[in-house]
Image: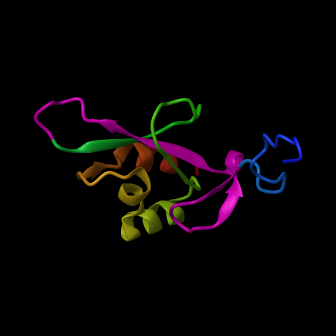
Amino acid sequence: MTGHLRTDRQSPSHAGRRTCVGCRRRDDRSALLRVVARAAQEPDTATVAVVPDVEERRPGRGAWIHPTADCFEQAVRRRAFGRALRVSAPLDLSAVRGEVGSSQ
């Protein structure tokens, strides 16, 4: 052992890069929208709400997407949100759809 402690696991060229769940392209975090799964407000529904995390501070597993209608539609078509967030329940994507629609 050489005594070197490496604290930066990613190389500088990869720091802050994430993959869009829609188009599968890598991009800087600043160009992507983070979304997280949140349990439904009504206890009798099995739907899980997927909500934008604009401040990137909500707890839990997140997924990243370009805030464009094309990437959103690709992610919906591929069922990528459920896989990325590891949720098998039906998803309510209305909040993300609204955020994507308002950013254009």
Q: Residue 88 in the image: x percent, y percent?
A: 27, 55
Q: Is residue 96 above or below residue 70?
A: above
Q: Is residue 103 visible?
A: no
Q: Is residue 36 magenta?
A: yes
The scheme the figure's colours follow is rainbow
Q: Quadrant of residue 78?
A: bottom left
Q: Is residue 33 magenta?
A: yes
Q: Residue at x 38, y 63 (%)?
A: 76
Q: Residue 70 in the image: x percent, y percent?
A: 52, 66
Q: Residue at x 76, y 51 (%)?
A: 10
Residue farthest toward the left in the current orientation of the protein: 44
Give the tally of numbered discs.
Answer: 0
Q: Residue 38 in the image: x percent, y percent?
A: 34, 36
Q: Residue at x 14, y 39 (%)?
A: 45
Q: Quadrant of residue 11?
A: bottom right
Give the magenta-colored segment's residue range: 17-45
Q: Is residue 31 left or right of residue 40?
A: right
Q: Which residue is nearer to you in this view: 19 or 12? A: 12
Q: Is residue 57 visible?
A: yes
Residue farthest toward the front in the current orientation of the protein: 1
Q: Residue 90 in the image: x percent, y percent?
A: 23, 52
Q: Quadrant of residue 95?
A: top left
Q: Residue at x 59, y 31 (%)?
A: 55
